[in-house]
Image (tube, rainbow, N blue to C red):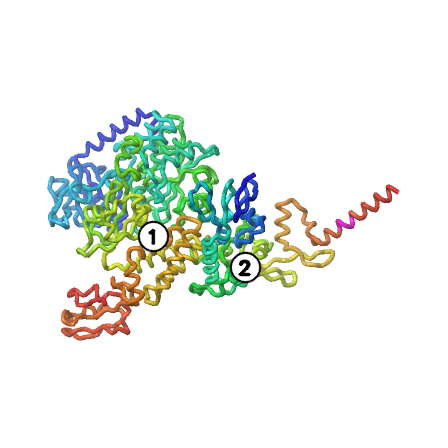
Amino acid sequence: MVHLTINGKVVQATEGEMLLAVIRREGIEIPALCHHEAVEPFGACRLCTVEITKEEWDGWSNFVTSCLYPVEDNLIVSTHSPTVIELRKTLIDLQLARSPNSPEIRQLAEEYGITKTSYEEIPEGDNCILCGLCTRICDQMGFAAISTVGRGHGKKVAPPLDEAPPDCVGCLACALNCPTNVIEFTDEGNIRTIWKKQFELITCTKCGKKTITKDFAKALSESRNIPMSYFEICDECHRKELAQTMGRIVSWSREAVS
Amino acid sequence: MRIDSPQRLQELQKEYVAREKSFAKKVLVCCGPGCLASGAAQIVEEFKKLLKKKRIKKFSVEALKETGCHGLCQQGPLVVIEPKGIFYTKVKPKHVEEIIETSIRKDEVVTDLLYTDPKTGQTIERYADIDFYSRQHRIALRNLGKISQYDIRDYIAQGGYQALAKALTTMTPDEVVDEMTKSGLRGRGGAGFSTGRKWATCLKAKEQPHYVICNGDEGDPGAFMDRAIMEGDPHSVLEGMIICAYAIGSKDGYIYVREEYPLAVQNLQLAIDQANEYGLLGENILGNGFSFNIKVSRGGGAFVCGESSALMKSVAGEVGEPRAKYVRSVLKGLFDKPTVLNNVESLANVPVIISEGGEQFASLGTPKSTGTKAFSLVGKVCNTGLIEVPMGTTLREIIYDIGGGIQNDRPFKAVQTGGPSGGCLPESKINLPVDFDSLTEAGSMMGSGGMIVVDDRTCVVDLAKYFLSFLVEESCGKCTPCREGLYQLHRLAVKISEGEATEADLDKMEKLSEMIIIGSLCGLGKSGPNPFLSTIRYFRDEYLAHIKDKRCPAGVCRALIRYEVITDKCDGCMACISTCAVHAITGKKGEVHVIDQDKCDKCGACYAICTRHAIEVI
């Protein structure tokens, strides 16, 4: 067990845990746009930066991203010190200059009292904040179909050569986890379109609902050794089937007892 | 041929020294980056052709050597005739025949090609007598310009690989690390971390395997020290790496070279192949049982890949983006294993430290910045080139004594040290000793050793704008403060240079800089605002002239200047009229010309071409 102080309160944490997890457990709100429990911490948006110090540091303090900083004994953490707030405001202000039309960024800005960016709005800016969560989640899923391309200010998220990505299976992990909902996709009939690529959706043979894409089912079948037939019905119908089976087992056993 | 023991290496050294002595004369053609660009390859060809044709008695063709950078790039292409050290400058292929007839067949000198001292106007025969060379102290650059860049025999003749033999046979890894610690060597890549401490930490790291990486991703504009070493003396880097590998217990090493250095890649690979053939690399080095392999890894041309964690990702085949180093790369580096990453110049110093002892190295320089440092001295200085001086040498000695002062006797304005993320030091700092701590204190940094001298015709706003635009381009784009913050900082600098800014913008820039420094993930972002911060620190008046008076005192920022004809100087020669691309100048022969300010795009071509200095910048 590790003991540290967060905003004046002594708290316990497990060794190896990151500061952000402990801060959130304490019910303290700090924004972290590029963070997701399913992937390794990344430290790109810098919004979760906190000020840390220790008694033996003689008044010296440091600024670290809490998503990446492992807890330490006797650490004194301020999540809302004046400099931290100033940094967070600057970061949001800068992000607002890139994504002035993003509802998520505008809401965050409002929370910090910013209604309009104080910097020059970027002509080619869009709602993507380049946090890279989509690409990291795609890597984690085992597909690595998209990646960040280029560097610096011209960086963007894209499939290889900006063409329909050969390794994409249309699982939507990227789009559904995007903090600013910028990745577009459509489901029309049994066709899903994402990243300029079209996928056929499986129709549940029981209820007729559209489930996952055929490509995703195939990938799961291969990587996890699940028979393709499993994907012919949807999750809901699987659960129904399971519940019915359980019900039957229960009634059999009752019969057997009586 | 494999060298199977240190004794055999010594015998070979003797043999190769005798071979060098057997050459009555040697012709050394500098094939460093600067000389190659001005035609050194053609000179080598011409020498080969004519020497073959002429068949001079007692002159072996093997005594014609293509060397690495000799140093005085301003005067290139350079040719040196040894053993006397006769120094020919600005040589062209047409001069080759005369050099052969005069200095090789006979024992005379081609006076037209000699170096002229800009201060005295005297010609100087030997390079050792030129201030540029005589005031230097070379350790990392010890062999540059003296040996063939392609031949391991030349390196061995200079005592090469003796330090490796000494370390392998007479020292334990701990003793090697101790020697490095005693030397006080601090990383020459810029951060200045103690090399000995780095090695010691890695040696103690329990996790296996350990890796050695040489950082050859020199990306600062105007810097070419590492390039010159990798191209001109690749074996010194290899020897440094092998000694490091022995000290930290590593079996595999990588040299990460930037994409833009194809010749460095070629020469390093050649050197690796030769070292393998000689048994100085690979299995059972020098018959001692120690094995080590080196691979060359090519970068993709990104400045940020000079940053340690980004570099290691790039070597591993991932996108070259830095990671937060709350756990240091010496413990969790390449493939998450303990890794020593040293810069090219640091490694080139290692053999000398091991041969001559750490204390000897530490006796040079200052107590906290020991030894010597190589710099690429460029910009508006008379003698541009590659130099190496003891730490603590003042900027004045470097710029005036070695560099020969400012070109065309213009006033010195500032010197940019440490590359784009370094800083700009003004004339008031001219007596500053150049060492890690003094430079940092003065608001600049050592960096990898680029030194760009500017005169009064350079605008500091323009300079800051240039370096900021470089960093905006080269930021990896991973974290917000660096990607977006530097972009906005650059936009504000542009606003100033266009005369559109207010004093409030300056405050905004200073605040933003502070936030970029504390908020950025890696060193690139954290030092990114330096071009602005160091210029505003020393040249606030010049910034204010742009903002308040809408004036660029250096006459550079196009939106704030105009070109005018000085009527009593113009003789109507029409030279400016014919050079003006936008036809903004009118006038007849013999009559005073007039510049149409609405048409003029302020390119400065008329100013440059007017021999009567009849055009002024206002």
Bin the neighbour count of mark 2 within 10 Å (Cα to Cα): few under 14, some 14-19, many 20 and up. some
Query: Are marks 1 and 2 in one subunit?
Result: no
Q: Is residue B427 left or right of residue A61?
A: left
Q: Which residue position holds label 2?
A: A180
| Residue type at tag 1 | Pro
Does the magenta-highlighted stretch encompass residue A29?
no
| Residue type at tag 2 | Thr
List x then y, in percent, for residue B265: 35, 43
Q: Is residue A55 left or right of residue B559?
A: right
Q: Which residue position holds label 1?
A: B420
- Residue under the image location 47 percent in, 46 percent down: A52
Q: Locate the C terminus of chain B and report the quarter of the image it occupies.
A: bottom left
Q: Is residue B269 left or right of residue B58?
A: right
- Residue under the image location 34 percent in, 56 percent down: B532
List x then y, in percent, for residue B497: 32, 64
Q: CA distance from mark 1 to mark 2?
A: 34 Å
Chain where mark 2 sits: A
Numbered disc 2: secondary structure: loop
* Residue furthest right in the image: A258
Q: Nearer the viewer, residue B451 or B21?
A: B451
**Relative height, residue A207 to residue A56 (above, below):** below
Bin the neighbour count of mark 1 within 10 Å (Cα to Cα): few under 14, some 14-19, many 20 and up. many
The magenta segment: A241-245
